[in-house]
């Protein structure tokens, strides 16, 4: 009795891991991925920040200047490389959202929940963060000229000095 070779198609399915498991993996490989019609083949081995998981809505590399996200529930959303210049987001939930390399000049996040958000390499020139909760947010290498931090909670932030 012989074996017969048959053509097979394999389907790989990715399942989101629970936060503890996802945090243990230091890098993401997404060669040839497409986000909103834009190829991001350069995303191979893109570093994932240890405290921000960005498992929510995907707004990477979108252009939304002057947009309004007031009152929105966008916890864990990924705004990596997005343009939100001059946008308004009063009293919105952006906890654990990614704003890595985002352009946020003149944006207003007044009264927002930004706990654990990642602003690494973001441009926040003239942004209004007044009354927001920034507990544990990461501002490593962010441009922070002229930002309004009145009444903010900056406990445990990285790269931010309220003075």
Image (cartoon, rainbow, N blue to C red):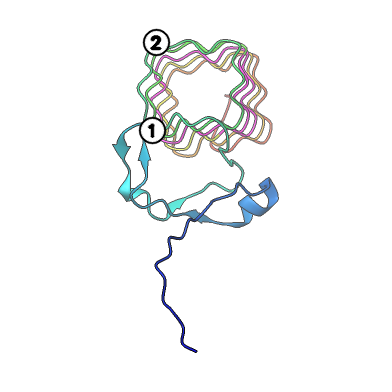
Q: Say if 72 sits above or below 158 in the image.
A: above
Q: Residue at x 50, y 89 (%)?
A: 1
**Residue density around tag 2, few if under 14, some if 14–19, many if 20 or more, within 10 Å:** some
Residue 151, image x, y percentages: 65, 14
* The C terminus lies in quadrant: top right
Quarter-of-image position of residue 35: top left
User: Which residue is labeled 1 in the image?
Assistant: 81
User: Which one is in front, 132 or 11?
Assistant: 11
**Total marks drawn?**
2
What is the CA distance from the residue labelled 1 to the residue labelled 2?
A: 16 Å
In the image, taking residue 6 as reference, residue 117 lies left or right, namely right
Determine which quarter of the picture holds residue 93. top right
The residue that appears at 53% across and 35% down in the rendered structure is 118
Q: Is residue 111 magenta?
A: yes
Measuring 33% from the left and 43% from the top, which residue is drawn there?
A: 40
Disc 1 residue crowd, few under 14, some 14–19, many 20+, Cα 10 Å: many
Question: Which residue range is magenta in the image?
Answer: 92-117
Mark 2 residue element: loop
Query: Which residue is rendered at x = 57% and y = 12% of the image?
Result: 110
Disc ID at residue 66: 2
Q: Nearer the viewer, residue 76 or 126?
A: 76
Q: Look at the numbered disc 1 and give the secondary structure of its residue.
A: loop
- Tell me which label, 1 or 2, sits earlier in the chain: 2
Q: Position of residue 113 (x, y in %)?
A: 64, 22
């Amino acid at each position: 009795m012989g074996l017969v070779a048959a053509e097979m198609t394999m389907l790989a399915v990715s399942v989101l891991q629970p936060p503890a498991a996802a945090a243990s993996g230091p890098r993401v490989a997404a060669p040839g991925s497409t986000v909103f019609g834009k190829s991001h083949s350069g995303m191979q081995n893109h570093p994932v920040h240890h405290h921000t998981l960005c498992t929510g809505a995907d707004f990477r590399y979108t252009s939304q200047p002057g947009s309004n996200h007031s009152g929105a529930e966008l916890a864990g959303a990924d705004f990596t490389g997005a343009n939100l210049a001059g946008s308004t987001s009063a009293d919105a939930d952006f906890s654990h959202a990614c704003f890595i390399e985002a352009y946020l000049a003149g944006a207003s996040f007044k009264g927002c929940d930004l706990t654990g958000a990642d602003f690494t390499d973001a441009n926040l020139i003239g942004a209004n963060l007044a009354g927001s909760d920034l507990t544990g947010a990461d501002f490593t290498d962010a441009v922070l000229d002229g930002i309004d931090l009145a009444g903010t909670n900056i406990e445990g932030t990285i790269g931010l000095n309220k003075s």
